[in-house]
Image (spheres, grey):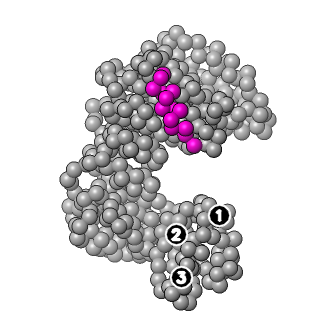
């Protein structure tokens, strides 16, 4: 049995719904279908989820909302009418709109994007509709109740055999809706694959698999045919927007491969993400992100002061800030963190380190991190040399270097204003050296 998940652009309108049906019909093993909310039909269009978030704010602050709701209703009606579906989606939408008030549960409101989409898709495919609120259950601390969800998902699948389920949400024990993070339908699909021991988890989007670099920055980057879970986690953590980061672990634990496919080009085999990906070039891909800052802590003789590092890091921990890297010198070390995460507290943290630990603290903003990732890099000499030569030839200064102990990645920190040049020149240069 195959679990399939379709992203928003694969469900944007009736034309996309037809493509989904063809895909489902072409392989009888595709019996579990997870859907996102309808996404953009063209580049300036709105995603239903974004419209629902906007509608939620309008309701909360009492700003008139008729146009937004009407545009949402029109999207679902177009799908129903063009596909001649029997389901009375208008009545369901109308019924739901009666719950609109200042105090509407925002999670419930936003989750309706997926809910109504799944109602239509179930009717179109002739599969049973299973509400995620009934089967994906969270405990009150917001963590997925894995045992309970598994039991419920299995029972629903055993009962119906072929199901459509909305992604992106579930419910607390009292039935209140809880949303996952944005893009969370990927995570729903991953858990369903695990709970139902799928042979494969197909994730259908609008790109034919993963590219070896961001196609907006590198010229025509090649598609990756196979990649390991670990490589993908490194690349997506560093900004490659492929799958939701949290969607990899559940299938990885269960040893189920993910196949990324393109709804608009179903003949393309896409990318397989699995435990083993075999031999190949040393480098699999590169990715990066702007928006980091380095907090530099200076203190004479700090390298002989046992516990100093821990004391500094515990101040970041107190403010719930994730630490990315800590490049170290004799009398100083840097703490690299996300600017966005640190924005609220960074000045408090700096002054606390100065006053409580007797250190001087400075800050370097606008750092970009680039990760070069490859399962076949370990033990292969010359990769760092090639990376630095390319950056040197572009006059790009390296501010920080890190390599994971298993040699799965090499990370360089550079000034954010050279980020685009760095990605495109690294992609071209590493390909020219046959390293990628
Ligand atoms: N519709 C939600 C979003 O736009 C969830 C998803 O598509 O996975 O983030």
Residue 80, percent across and down?
Answer: 52, 16
Image: 124 above or below 286: above
Residue 42 shows up from this direction: no
Q: Is 154 colored magenta in this rendering?
A: yes
Please tell me which residue lies in front, 182 or 404. 404
Mark 3 surroundings within 10 Å by alpha-carbon count, few (fewer than 14), some (14 through 19), many (20 or more): few
Q: Which numbered disc, 1 or 2, marks the residue that appears first in the sequence?
A: 1
Please tell me which residue lies in front, 51 or 204. 204
Residue 168, percent across and down?
Answer: 54, 35
Mark 2 lies on a secondary structure that is strand
Mark 1 surroundings within 10 Å by alpha-carbon count, few (fewer than 14), some (14 through 19), many (20 or more): some
Mark 1 lies on a secondary structure that is loop
User: What are the residue bounds of the magenta stretch?
Assistant: 143-156
Mark 3 lies on a secondary structure that is loop
Residue 423, percent across and down?
Answer: 37, 61
Q: Are marks 3 and 1 in contact (CB under 8 Å)?
A: no
Q: Are marks 1 and 2 in contact (CB under 8 Å)?
A: no
Residue 211, percent across and down?
Answer: 33, 49
Point 30% across, 47% down: residue: 275
Q: Give residue 353's mark.
A: none
Q: Quadrant of the C terminus?
A: bottom left
Write down the residue under mark 3: 306
Write down the residue under mark 1: 319
Q: Give residue 336's mark.
A: 2
């Amino acid at each position: 049995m195959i679990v399939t998940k379709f992203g928003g652009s694969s469900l944007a309108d009736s034309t996309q719904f037809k493509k989904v049906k063809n895909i489902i019909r072409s392989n009888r093993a595709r019996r579990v279908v997870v859907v996102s909310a309808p996404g953009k039909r063209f580049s300036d269009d709105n995603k239903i989820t974004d419209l629902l978030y906007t509608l939620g704010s309008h309701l909360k602050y009492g700003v008139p909302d008729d146009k937004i709701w009407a545009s949402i209703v029109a999207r679902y009606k177009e799908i129903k009418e063009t596909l001649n579906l029997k389901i009375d989606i208008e009545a369901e939408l109308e019924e739901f709109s009666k719950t609109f008030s200042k105090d509407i549960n925002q999670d419930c409101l936003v989750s309706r994007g997926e809910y109504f989409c799944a109602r239509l898709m179930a009717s179109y495919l002739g599969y049973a509709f299973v509400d995620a609120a009934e089967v994906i259950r969270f405990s009150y601390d917001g963590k997925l109740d894995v045992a309970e969800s598994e039991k419920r998902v299995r029972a629903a699948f055993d009962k119906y055999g072929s199901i459509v389920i909305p992604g992106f949400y579930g419910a607390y024990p009292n039935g209140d809706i809880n949303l996952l993070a944005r893009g969370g339908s990927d995570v729903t699909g991953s858990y369903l694959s695990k709970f139902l021991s799928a042979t494969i988890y197909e994730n259908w989007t609008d790109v034919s698999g993963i590219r070896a670099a961001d196609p907006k920055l590198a010229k025509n980057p090649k598609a990756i045919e196979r990649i390991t879970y670990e490589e993908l986690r490194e690349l997506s953590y560093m900004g490659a927007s492929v799958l939701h980061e949290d969607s990899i672990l559940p299938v990885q634990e269960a040893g189920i491969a993910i196949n990324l496919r393109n709804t608009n080009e179903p003949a393309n085999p896409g990318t397989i993400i699995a435990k083993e990906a075999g031999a190949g070039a040393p480098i699999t891909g590169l990715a990066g992100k702007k928006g980091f800052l380095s907090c530099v802590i200076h203190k004479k003789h700090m390298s002989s002061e046992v516990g100093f590092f821990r004391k500094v890091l515990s101040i970041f921990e107190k403010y719930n800030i994730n630490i990315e890297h800590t490049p170290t010198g004799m009398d100083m070390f840097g703490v690299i963190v996300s600017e966005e995460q640190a924005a609220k507290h960074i000045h408090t943290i700096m002054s606390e380190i100065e006053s409580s630990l007797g250190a001087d603290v400075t800050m370097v903003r606008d750092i970009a991190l680039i990760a070069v990732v490859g399962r076949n890099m370990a033990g292969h000499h010359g990769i760092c040399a090639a990376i630095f030569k390319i950056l040197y030839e572009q006059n790009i200064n390296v501010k920080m270097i890190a390599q994971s102990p298993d040699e799965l990645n090499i990370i360089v920190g550079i000034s954010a204003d050279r980020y685009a040049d760095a990605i495109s020149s690294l992609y071209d240069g590493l390909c020219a050296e046959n390293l990628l």
